[in-house]
Amino acid sequence: MLTANYQQFYQQAKSFIPEERLITDRFRTLAYGTDASFYRLVPKILVQVKDEAEMIALMRLAAELALPICFRGSGTSLSGQSITDSIMLALTSDWKDLTVLENGARIKMQCGVLGSEANRALAPHQRMLALMPASIDAATVGGMAINNAAGMNSLDTYTMMESMRLVLLDGTVLDTADPLSRKAFRQVQGPLLAGIEQLADQLRSNPALAERVARKYQIKNTTGYGLRSLLEYDDPIDMLAHLMIGSEGTLGFISEITHRSIAIQPYKASAFLVFNDIRNAGVAVTRFKLDKAPVSAAEMIDYYALKAVQHMDGVPGYLADIPTGATALLVQVESNNKEQLWQQVAEVEAMIADLELAVPAQFTDRPEEYSAYWQVRKGIFPAVGATRPAGTTALIEDVAFPIESLADALVELQQLMQQYNYDDGVIYGHALDGNLHFIFSQGFQTDAEVQRYHEFMDVVCKMVVERYDGSLKAEHGTGRNMAPYVQAEWGDEAYHIMRSIKQLFDPQGILNPDVMITNDPQLHIRNLKPLAQVSDVVDQCIECGFCERMCPSRNLTLSPRQRIIARRELMRLEGKDADQFSDQYDYMGIDTCAGCGLCSTVCPVKINTGDLIRDLRHERNVSHSNMAQWAADHFGGLASAARTAFGIADGGHRLLGSKAMGAVTCSARKLSGNRIGHWSPSTPTAAPKIKPQQLITTDAVTDSTPQSSEPKLKVVYLPSCASRTMGPARGAEFQQSLQQVTEKLLQRAGYEVIYPTGLGDQCCGMPFKSKGMFDQAEQKAAQTLAMLEDATQQGEIPVYCDTSPCVMRLKEHMAEQHSKVTLFEPVEFIHSYLLDKLPLQKQSEPVALHITCSARRLGLADKTLAIMQACSDNVVVPEQVTCCGFAGDKGFTTPELNASALSTLAKQVGHCESGYSTSRTCEIGLSEHSGIDYQSIVYLVDRCSIS
């Protein structure tokens, strides 16, 4: 129940924000309001904000009512700066506009653009953002700006920002790139600018303090406000803009930012240089820095961090047997000339020739290898966090030392962790800048555990500040975690200036209170996040949020992170609260999960939240196991019934037309309580039955077919149950079924096509697995595999299956059974065996491509694009579309999931002639929500290969 002042905010906000974007229930405020830090506060109101006008109105309203507010982008922050127990203003997915300027030299972006999206836009120009935080794929550029993100080089947001558009608490807007906006701002905000100038004069008039400020920014520092802006700029507007960088939402809101980009060098080489101990690694990196070695990055990874990432793809084999205590530097060398690249590599090796390596230096210039190395580096924090003991939290701290002191500081930091019994603590980070992260497992269940953490932080802060004059926060932001120590690092005079800055911008103290500036010396040990044990499947999750961008339900209900957060909370609740939470979780957590597994492709510890949801569906559906068994035993009859149902629906469509048919089926669905499936004009017709004479065994082919002088190529064709029951949509350009087109294409390439005996009764098991009916899923997969073993003469003949999800499901089962059958997904087979046999004539018309989630997980994204580009000069791969959300039958039973996942599709592909994919069910929803026909990629290859 909201108190009177929050109720007033809600009622007034309701006049300009739709009520569905004003969230007050405990379930969603908790799930949406939790970030990657180890703190938890639950908003009273969470507002989903879609544009700057709404943000201005909401900030003014909060100021009028004196209610604290906090801004939220992706929530990947680690220090507690993006949480609140008041009002959270969370960006929707609408803040995505970007403009590439001057052939990529600059890029202008709304604050909700992800770093990965900006880099994709810059890539055609061989440019990229200078910022390289480990979270760049998932973090917004607005979040990176207010945290002054940097990463694996020395370039931070403060340095690379050219201009910004910002909003102050009273709603005043400033676009620093617009002279008219600057002029208007001076007139309206004269007192603020005068106050900033006065603080600059105060700092400059104190030479000792000014010198200290300048010196402290010679290494990375994000502790407190960026006082260097008061020294480095003369115009107070420029001072103001640069004070906003790293201000963590405590001074205002950044709605748009323009960055200078950097060039992508065409030649790169990377290596893990493994030293026997951490001191020698520190000595090496100090030489690199002081002697200006030709390295673009040098990342330190200590022994325990190296062990934590052993499971990750791309880790070189030589890291498996390194001696205890060894420490690696992941070094990268870059050049625009290959010969010069290797000269630079030799120079780097010569600089450390006198330092003993645990394994010889092995640089690689193969993009797939060095790219994998850097993905491993990005995944260290989640990977280490996943190894923590159950019930503990993975804490990450972030400090920087003058490079001359690095080796000594490393050893002392290791000793402190051992002294306080953080035996699992790891050290890694951007060593070239003296910037180190250290991670350790921390329990907060007892007062003694909290006290140990408090004492450890005190002694670390004294060591960093008093012994080395380093930075308590180098790039992760001050947040709640380090706010009590800002004064200790900067001293009274500098801290007084910081307090004055806060007062100038936010006299009411309502912009993210307690972040950056606090009066509470215990703030860093309050509101600590509980992590209840849920399931072995997801207990490793540290709620980093890397997964969220991949999830098709992220804008409808919950993301994978939020499903785990809510499930953890549900495990803690009892009584009526638990019942209410559970009811909400049934729909938001379970029913609207596509189970696509794309979350696992970007999770550093490969957590597939879909596996958790399938386990929960299993528990929920256990009473229906007899029905599932009947369906598995009578699958052929059910498939025939489905084909008949599609035929009846198509007949109604033919008679009534699209509009009337839509009205009738919509009404029927409502009257049935949504038990009748969703219909659209893209719903398939009935697929024609495969002719009986085509259903022949391998033995029959061998015995009766005349032998030619050359052995004929053979392939066993496994049409999925979807392609056996679903034909093209009424009105689709190509009206032959997928099975017919596939057979024709394979025969044109010179293959004899063999259909397995008993095909109509079989299925990969995916429909059963998705509902948690695991026994029946295994039964159908086993029966299908047995059928294929017979048809292929125990693996002698390859198998072509026309549907990506079915291939993935069967390959998982085959791997468990160590089967000899070789199974190919359409793209895999076409790319490897048909392209060289079928001359293709490219078309010039634009065509859209949807890479299915299963094709992505099978590692076929690049091959899919290659086939499309062999067929067309104009291939469109829409942004922000990952899994389509049709998810087998979810497009029929939960169509809002499909609609949400594809909400941005139509405007991106509406100009295309047609669209292509590798899953018949996906193509139904893609066609409905794009306005163009989507069919299998086989249709395009067939079309372009016709002479």
Image (cartoon, rainbow, N blue to C red):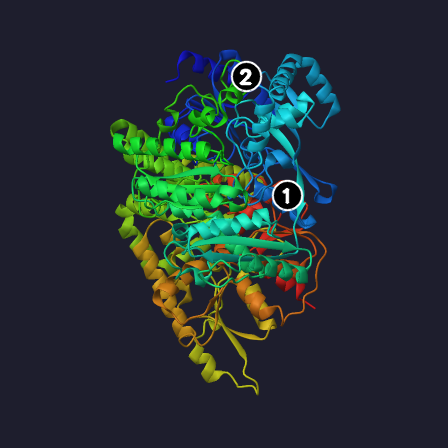
Q: Which residue matches tag 2? A: 500
Identify the image quadrant of the C terminus: bottom right
Residue at (26% x, 30% y) in the render: 447
x, y percent for residue 352: 53, 57
x, y percent for residue 558: 43, 37
Secondary structure beneath disc 2? helix
Image quadrant where residue 422 sits: top left
Q: Is residue 160 left or right of residue 306?
A: right
Secondary structure beneath disc 1? helix
Amino acid under disc 2: Ser
Q: Which residue matches tag 1? A: 908
Residue at (50% x, 83% y) in the render: 705
Front residue (pair 337, 932) = 337
Front residue (pair 940, 880) = 880
Image disc number at residue 414: none
Image quadrant where residue 152 sits: top right
Q: Is residue 325 above or below residue 188?
A: below
Q: Residues within 10 Å of mark 2 (few under 14, many from 20)?
A: some
